[in-house]
Image: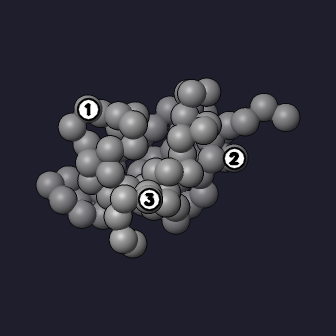
Amino acid sequence: MEVNMQHLFSVGDTVYGFCDGFFGSSDYETKKCVYVTPIYAVFEYVEGEFEGGGVILGYEPKMVNLVDKWKFPTNSII
């Protein structure tokens, strides 16, 4: 089975910090997944300058091994 966004994210998942630049080179805000399909996921900013706004993340194979550290960062207390 090929990995897709529905394997990586579920509605309600929260991602923290830089996320290896997948959301942009200056995006460090906390985001919550509000919708997910096999090819993309929609996230809502839950804090910061863009709070209440959204951003779409498209699937890229290189993100597969990175997503867990976005959800559970080791350098912060959640």
Residue 76 relative to residue 3: left or right: left
Label pair 2/3, CB-CB below 8 angstroms: no
Which callout, 1 or 2, points at the residue further toward the start of the chain? 2
Q: What residue is pinned by disc 3?
A: 74
What residue appears at the point 36 percent right and 71 percent down from the top-left corner? Answer: 77
- For image coordinates 57% across by 27% down, the residue present is 62
Quarter of the image with the N terminus is top right
**Residue annotated with mark 1:** 25
The three-letter code of the residue at mark 1 reads: Ser
SS at circle 3: loop
Residue ID at (39%, 43%): 19
Q: Looking at the picture, how far across and down is residue 20, in whole percent?
A: 39, 37
Identify the residue at horizontal 78%, vertical 31% (top origin). 2
SS under mark 1: loop
Question: CA separation, marks 2 and 3?
Answer: 22 Å
x, y percentage for residue 51? 23, 60
Distance, label 1 to label 3, CA atoms, is 20 Å
Q: Is residue 71 left or right of residue 47?
A: right
Callouts 1 and 2 close, C-beta under 8 Å = no
Callout in the foreground (1, 3): 3
Mark 1 surroundings: few (<14), some (14-19) or many (≥20) residues within 10 A: few
Residue 46 visible in image: yes
Q: Earlier in the sequence, mark 1 or mark 3?
A: 1
Q: Label 2 sits on what residue type?
A: His
Local SS, label 2? helix
Is the C-beta separation of discs 1 and 3 under 8 Å? no
Place of residue 30 in the rendered image (x, y in percent of width and height, measured from the top left): 32, 58
For mark 2, what is the residue? 7
